[in-house]
Image (spheres, coloured by chain):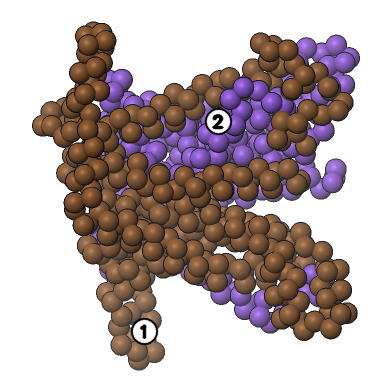
Chain colours: A brown, B purple
Amino acid sequence: MSVTGAPRPRRPWKGLGRPRGQPSSEARAAYAPFLWLAVFFLVPFLLVAKLSLSDVVLAIPPYAPRLDWSAGLPGLIDFVRALDFEAYARMGQDGLYLAAYLSSLKFAAVATVILLLVGYPLAYGMAKCRPSVRQALLMAVILPFWTSFLIRVYAWIAILKPAGLLNMALAQIGLPPVDILNTDTAVYIGLVYAYLPFMVLPLYAVLERQEAGLLEAAADLGCTPFQSFWRVTFPLSLPGVAAGALLCFIPMVGEFVIPDLLGGSGTLMLGKTIWTEFFSNRDWPAASAVAIVLLATLVIPIVLFQRQQTKIMEQR
Amino acid sequence: MRRGPSAFNIAAIVLGMGFLYLPIVLLVIYSFNESRLVTVWGGFSTRWYVSLFQNEQLLAAAWVTLRVAFVSATLATILGTLAALGLVRAGRFRGRTLFSSMTYAPLVMPEVILGLSLLLLFVSVGVARGFWTVMIAHTTLTLCYATVVVKARLVSFDEALEEAARDLGAPPWKAFALVTLPNIAPAVAAAWMLAFTLSLDDLVIASFTSGPGATTLPIRIYSAVRLGVSPEINAISTLLIGLVATGVIAVYLLNMRRRTPGA
């Protein structure tokens, strides 16, 4: 497949062989979405970077300096001179930012491990079923992915709250009540619950495609079922493990809804920090600086994820 | 994997599915609760659904949300299909790596960053926030999902068919419309559905980019949720889940039916 852009032998004039300045009609088709993403995805990031170097002022919009195009080149020079790293310096001085940063990484990392432990057996079990059952189970995993994130998180509030359904069930069987809502435990439950489909789908995709013959061969060579799982199935499923882990870890680091609704006042996460700085404190430069730091942290996993996706597409 | 599921496999499936569905099932059940309290079952009642349809704020928000979702999903599907065509078919062109990265990044990018960055764009250009800004923001997010869905289908479609049409004298757009498009139509429909539901669900990006006149349903639900659990939220959630589930299962069955005779 020509995913990487290698021209197909059938049409040697496509791709590389084309004289410069004569894009194919397919390349021209991509102009519109390319332009859209440049304007509404790329440019906004440059603005975040710029704003993170600005200062807070009491005005609308609440930051300075603002670039005055009518002042021409001197205006631009003044503008650049007025930029500084104050927002970052404040971040370095305030221990709360560092705590939120580390705690976000911890939440995302621990939740990813739990997701693997919960998602792998589920995906593995699904792959072992008959094809018709598999299809139904696959649908059942995909359906929550389509259902509102907010609603699924909300559903947990009714379960976990002090006078909620969990404590009601515990009282029925004579156990003491637990106080989970607004704690870190609730955030972990929410993260694992909301991201489970994102973990199961890539795992299932690799496990489903594995040849049954491999396991038979392992059994013929004297492997116990556990050995053949550990030495054949698991190593072969590593691309799915990597895809699932990245697909969950990256957005979880910046998660807002779950820590906000299920976590307590002591639950620190960067997504919440950005939200608070922006909406409550109206400190747009600080919100932007936190966003830039978050993005800088996630660049490597995002690039890894893209590489992996491209590789998967090539293998089809 | 021919031997069929073991007891361990079945246990994993039952527990996993239970975990995925129990909260949703409870939410749906309690939307029909006569009592306002979560833990007290006061008998079956549809009163919360009735009060929902008398809540004009909520209805207005639902209307805004549906309009935003419809327009942005349509635009995102068109742009996403074009992007997929460019990425799968155009070979190497200038800026391809950047373009490809831009269609992947929003899939995993934390939503707070996307929301914040788009808001800054709208503020610096001086656009008043409202319907159109939310629509643009949602198009930007969902066009990437649409691209992935259509791309997956295009990769497995034999380009030679369209080439044959061109060799027989069809202009490129006609060859595309008559040969390729009908073949990728299920994926295009799925892309639209996905874009529509993502837009319908989004809270974070909409919070950053919407203005006073364009409060969406998730924003309303969110502010109500912060005040605590209420049966009205259960009722509106049940309606949304029902709507999305019906759509998803319909598209799924449609895809199944088309695929079975050929493949």
List x then y, in percent, for residue A244: 57, 57
Q: Give SS at disc 2.
A: helix
Left or right of A181: which side holds A305?
right
Few, some or many residues within 10 Å of mark 1 (<14, 14–19, 20+): few
Q: Nearer the viewer, residue A26 or B129?
A: A26
Few, some or many residues within 10 Å of mark 2 (<14, 14–19, 20+): few
Image: A58 above or below A213: above
The residue shown at (28%, 23%) is B124
Left or right of A50: which side holds A82?
left
Quadrant of the rendered structure where residue A168 is?
Answer: bottom left
Quarter of the figure with the N terminus of chain A: top right
Image: B8 above or below A274: below
Chain letter, disc 1 residue: A
Q: Nearer the viewer, residue A151 or A83?
A: A83
* Residue A8 visible within the image: yes
Residue receiving disc 2: B98
List x then y, in percent, for residue A98: 27, 56
The residue shown at (79%, 70%) is B1
The residue shown at (33%, 33%) is A49
Residue receiving disc 1: A170
Q: Nearer the viewer, residue B74 or A216?
A: A216
Q: Amino acid at mark 2?
A: Leu
The residue furthest left is A58
